[in-house]
Amino acid sequence: MPAPSTRSLATKTAVAVALLLLTPLALAKPLSTESPGTPLELTDHNGQRRPLPFINGKVVMLSFGYTSCPDVCPVTLAMVGNVLRDLGPRAKEVQALFVSLDPERDSAERLRRYVQHFHPAILGLSGSHVELRRLGQRFKVTHSRRPGADGENYTLDHTANLYLLDAEGRVARIVPFGFPPQHVTRQVLELLGPGQ
């Protein structure tokens, strides 16, 4: 088999680099209009059972993580809080949700204190491992435990995307970790449509 030419290698490399650069932009665009299916129930940080996705006429900003997360979760929730503040009066048309993937450590009270540190309108949710696994399958969210040196202070590797759901509970956008609040605000406003 002949060795590939320098030109073909350069072309393949350029295509690979272009795909890597464009992938986040593609993921931030509409995904599908498929039905959200049967709602799953989780428990919010006030102890109330809630269906997810919420089909309540609001645009939903949905993220996953855990309160002991050292980096991704606080950065994401700080960004979500900034988006809610940037939306001004239209923030009442949006529901921000943070689903804890660590039910052993994230009690309702701990979850409530954590999310409200970033914005009082963010609602924390959690559930059993079975409920979280079903929800993860629906949103293609993965997580795995990484043991700490002492066996107790473990961390979780988890999907870091922000999911934007339309007013009918369908995933309309997936925003990869690291996008600035201004970008997410624009995406949310597009889903909200013209103001009243």
Image (cartoon, grey):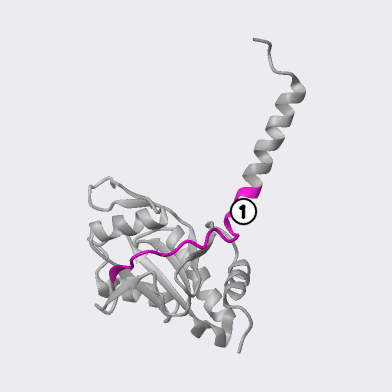
Q: Position of residue 174 (x, y in %)?
A: 52, 59
Quadrant of residue 14 in the image?
top right
* Residue 135 part of the magenta-drawn span: no
Give the camera-side residue of 194 and 186: 194
Q: Position of residue 6 (x, y in %)?
A: 75, 21
Q: Amino acid at mark 1?
A: Ala
Quadrant of residue 181 in the image?
bottom right
Image side of residue 81 versus residue 28, left or right:
left
The residue shown at (59%, 79%) is 86
* Residue 26 part of the magenta-drawn span: yes
**Circle 1 is placed at which residue position?**
26
Give the camera-side residue of 45 and 8: 8
Q: Quadrant of the C terminus?
A: bottom right
Q: Quadrant of the N terminus?
A: top right
Q: Is residue 83 above or below residue 7?
A: below
Image side of residue 9 versus residue 169, left or right:
right
**The magenta stretch spans which residues?**
22-42
Q: Is residue 189 above or below residue 15?
A: below
